[in-house]
Amino acid sequence: HVWLAAEGERYNVFQDLQTYELADIVSFSMNMWDVAPMEDFQISHKFLEWEAADRFGRPMYWQDGGNFNGNQRYPVNYNFNASELAAGTYGTLKRNTAWASVDADAMAIYVMGNASAGDLAVPMPDTPNFEYAVVPDSDGYGAVHTLQIRGRSSGSNVHREGTFQIKPCKRNGCWPPPPAPPPPPPDNFFSLWSAESTWANLTGHAANPLNVLKEIPLGRRRFAYTVKEQQNWNSSVPSHYDNVWIPSWKK
């Protein structure tokens, strides 16, 4: 398809096909001629099926930059948390619900294939070329994928070209699922309050809600979390007036 686009305008293109006749794009090339300095374009595709992350936070659909950037690219409006890597998993990918860069669109929100007006998450104006944002459908089946194309910061016009592949992971995920929590102890077993083993590794645990965590940016919207302020007791077991965290696997 070839379009002549006007600055500051948003267009919606319809194909004369029924839903059952359509198939999601798996590979496409994008060419933009005469992109002026500081000029931005956002190209949106509606995908009938797209799951950014599963219930474990594992990436499920992602954009491979092909000949432009061969690395896996997560949506800019999602954050990858690498803090779980040390726990034997691969991290989590979660949507940034506070994403501020949006564009009003007449077809931003989809429910059961029906579009309505709303705010569509788009890449920030200063993000690199061919970054993308993804807005999942309200019913969880598809998504709107918006690609960013930018001109140079100064100088002459430029031709932007990129080839991309949309790659879904297998149904069991790109990564192994996180390890299951320890099984609950039997009903006739109880940990001793006075035993040091009952409280081992709990005061410094990142899941302890009584601790304060520190966010460490790793670049490319990747973050790790460490314990900044740890809960402390006067001894290795809690005593009078000490706050305690008892996780679900303790009894």
Image (tube, grey):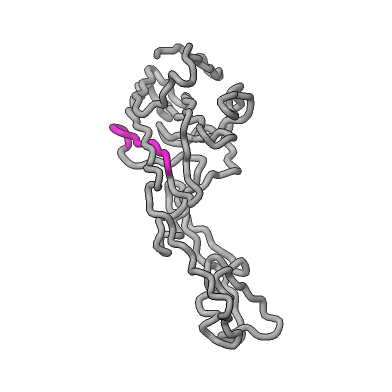
**Residue 111 in which image quadrant:** top right
* Residue 98 shown left or right of residue 35 in the figure: right
Q: In which quarter of the image is residue 202?
A: bottom right
Where is residue 132 drawn, in percent x and y? Answer: 45, 34
* Residue 63 forms part of the magenta stretch: yes
| Residue 38 placement (x, y as % from top left) | 46, 26
Query: In this rendering, is residue 204 above or below 20?
Result: below
Q: Residue furthest right?
A: 241
Q: Quadrant of the N terminus?
A: top left
Above or below 176: residue 87: below
Residue found at x 58% / y 68%: 248
Give the residue at x 58% y 80%: 188
How many marks on residues?
Answer: 0
Q: Is residue 250 magenta?
A: no
In the image, residue 90 lies at what x, y percent? 40, 55
Give the main secondary structure of the magenta stretch: strand
Could you tell me residue 147's position as x and y percent? 45, 29
229 versus 15 height, above or below: below
Find the residue positioned furthest to the left: 67
Quadrant where the C terminus sits is bottom right
Q: In this view, does 70 lie to the left or right of 243?
A: left
Instruction: Please give the range of residues in magenta.
Output: 60-69
Above or below, 223 against 34 in this view is below
Q: Residue at x 61, y 21 (%)?
A: 106
